[in-house]
Amino acid sequence: MSTQVVSFHYTLKDKSGKVLESSEGAAPVVYLEGAGQIIPGLESELTGLKKGDKKTVNVKAKDGYGEHDSSLIMTMDKSELPSKNIKVGQQFRGEAHDGHHQVFVVTAVTDKEVTLDGNHPLAGQDLTFEVQLVERREATKEELAHGHAHGPDGHHHH
Ligand code: ZN
């Protein structure tokens, strides 16, 4: 079967049933199959769905945003950071120990030091996605060449 572009709506809940995110009222999520655009535990469950199908998908942390990794939490001297006016919640792009790019969020600031956390906010959590498949179509040559899906309104990049 040819590679497809799939769009779907979702509501994401945590273990206790609290809604964390939802695409309701916004554009559906669009991805190119096999390109790693969405978490693996969700993509594998969407593979067999047809237009209009609904499904509840439980995703373990390791198949979702990964286990919480304490090596991604680091404390730095303020002088090592480019900005002087650092606040909790601020984000920085940096390199993890293995060299790949990672977004770090400031979780604590003292007079001298800043604590940064490179874990995804949903790392370590088992998640439940309620999904509805909106559309499935063949990927265009351009999408296959780029390795990602293009939006319904033409070309856009993240
Ligand atoms: Zn592109």
Image (tube, rainbow, N blue to C red):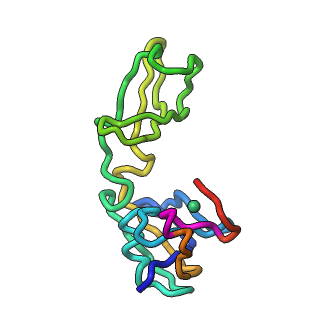
Q: Residue at x 46, y 68 (%)?
A: 129
Q: Is residue 88 left or right of residue 44?
A: right
Give percent across and percent down for residue 113: 43, 17
Check the image and report above or below for 3 versus 58: below
Give percent across and percent down for residue 100: 37, 42
Near-viewer residue (149 or 62)? 149
**Picture quarter containing residue 14?**
bottom left
Q: Residue at x 41, y 63 (%)?
A: 36
Task: Decide whether the magenta segment is chiefly helix, strand or loop.
Answer: loop
Check the image and report above or below for 11 versus 53: above
Q: Is residue 134 left or right of residue 78?
A: right
Give percent across and percent down for residue 61: 33, 57
- Where is the N terminus found, in terms of image quarters? bottom left
**Picture quarter containing residue 73?**
top left
Q: Residue at x 37, y 59 (%)?
A: 64
Q: Is residue 69 left or right of residue 138?
A: left
Q: Is residue 65 left or right of residue 89?
A: left
Give percent across and percent down for residue 74: 35, 28
Q: Magenta segment, which residues? A: 144-151
Q: Does the image show residue 6?
A: no
Near-viewer residue (65 or 153)? 153
Q: Does the image show residue 59?
A: yes
Check the image and report above or below for 91 versus 155: above
Q: Residue at x 58, y 63 (%)?
A: 22
How many numbered tags mark residues here?
Answer: 0
> Within the displayed image, which quadrant is ligand 1 positioned in?
bottom right
